[in-house]
Amino acid sequence: MGATATQPSVRLDADGLDRKLGFLGLMWASETSIIGSGWLFGALGAALLAGPAAILGWIIAAIIITVLALMHAELGGLFPVTGGTSRFPHYAFGSFAGATFGWASYLQAASVAPIEVLAAVQYLSTAHWARTFFKYNPAAGGAAGTLHGFGYLVALILLVLFVIFNLVGIRWLERISNVVTTWKVIIPCLAIVILIFGHFHSGNFGAAAGGFFFKHDAVKGIIETLPAGIVFSLLGFEQAVQLAGEAADPKRHLAKAVIGSVIIGTVVYILVQIAFIGAMDPHLLKQVGGWAGLSSPTAAKIPEVGLLTSGPFFEISSLAGVFWLATVLRIDAVVSPAGTGLIYTTSASRLSFGLSKNGFVPSAFERIDQRTKIPVFSVLIATLVGVLFLLPFPSWASLVAIVTSASVLMYAGAPLSAAALRRSKPNLERPYAVSGMGFLAPAAFVGATWIIIFSGWETYTTLMVAMLLGYLLIWISYRTNANANAPAMDWQALPWIAGYFLGLLVISYFGAFGPGGIIGGVGFFKNVLSNGGNDDLTLGGTLAASAVWAVICFYWAMSARLPESKVDEYVQDVYPSADTIGH
């Protein structure tokens, strides 16, 4: 392929959407997704598992997420298209890979809006007039509880509001998002300053509260914090990539928006964790026996611990006597998750738009309202899917693990796609090019694989059932000819994708993270699947086996990437002259 081949011009109007988003709009779209319910609940969930050592969990997660974000930044600049994460694997590996990672992308985006709604309702339940919205279960300990009574109605109303705001158009959405995100960044920073400089107890980090590493198996405790809320909290940087088809100057702004949002989010969350641990009432910790005792069923019967579960920072501020801050945080508990839920409703609709553009789902998903420039049908269906998620997962804690796993599975497609396209189309202009791709791409894929494994056997089997459901829906779309642009399936990706999933299934079953299973209580499966995550491999073996398998599958995928001519065919809508490269 000649090094002097003519660079094709990217077609920025390929999707027919309104390109009005600037740098701030793109970065704030990602930031409003990163700073959502995670800051309200993530610090508590991490502290229950690892105490002060949870800070290390945030650092580990930030490293993994940052590398994945770099991959998305390169791909987003290369292909500034709407619903990019659902389309990059299609360009690199063909239609089967596009369908697989596209469905994972849609699954995570559609499930985030309901999880943010759940967070808002759960926090509201700290008020006397809303106590019946969330039914707390002290016998189960930890963060157990479910949406209850009028809580379902309030959640439904919030989801409907997301639809209304989305349908007014991308320009109004940018204005709303910018205002909400500014609020969302200011309030955590305010809480950090007040709690660290006015109500900080350094003893909470040491022996007085059980020690920095309060668990015998401290490494596993730190690892378990990642899927329990830490990684979920840092998710969302890809929103700028999803909205690249509506960016005014994606080549100039996209990479900076993605990376900037990750940096801001990481700094805020680490400081939030420090503030939470330092501001915890030492007398309450002593009463329950330190950090380890906070998650016990006995401690959960203490009223203060119950309120801590429903509204962690609200209760922390109340115990510290900063009641005005507690009131502000209760308001933020509605504004912050609502802002994230709003942008994810937008994102889910753009992902289904991308799936339709690729031909995997009915063409109705890509119809644009000419007045608002919005894919109305996609927005409505995304909201309906969000409502359905409220039924089997009626609490924040119960939904966060599956959302995290679906998200990192989606993210795993980025390092694969970026590395494959470096090989297939090295001459395409890359406004941002990742340095050290040869090392960072497989490392990022290993990191994403680890987080999936860390989520445990029960979550992984649930994710696999959800993926099978997606394959079924896509098959129905094909069989009914619901999209005239449906491509022929590129089956060369099937062996490595199926091998990857099955290999992780085996590793997860014998791995250190479990137990349980989505169908573990039924007949034959009760004796087989319920024993998943049985720790036969031990922690070290689980990490090594999953890393080795991820590397094998990474290079397996590279060998099965699309040939250059096929890549040219698939990117015609973005690079009309791409077929001239190297010819």
Image (cartoon, grey):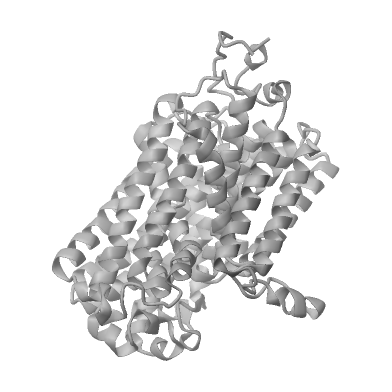
Q: Quadrant of the C terminus?
A: top right
Q: To which quarter of the image does residue 23 belong?
A: top left
Q: Nearer the viewer, residue 115 or 510?
A: 510
| Residue 156 x %, y % | 53, 64
Viewed as shown, does residue 270 lie left or right of 457? left
Q: To which quarter of the image does residue 197 belong?
A: bottom left
The relative height of residue 97 versus residue 432 in the rendered view (above or below) is: below
The relative height of residue 574 versus residue 350 in the rendered view (above or below) is: above
Q: Nearer the viewer, residue 77 or 40?
A: 77
Q: Residue at x 38, y 84 (%)?
A: 293
Q: Residue furthest right?
A: 479
Q: Residue at x 53, y 22 (%)?
A: 12
| Residue 37 x %, y % | 41, 61
Q: Residue at x 63, y 13 (%)?
A: 577
Q: Nearer the viewer, residue 81 or 286?
A: 286
| Residue 88 x %, y % | 61, 35
Q: Residue at x 64, y 63 (%)?
A: 460
| Residue 342 x %, y % | 46, 51
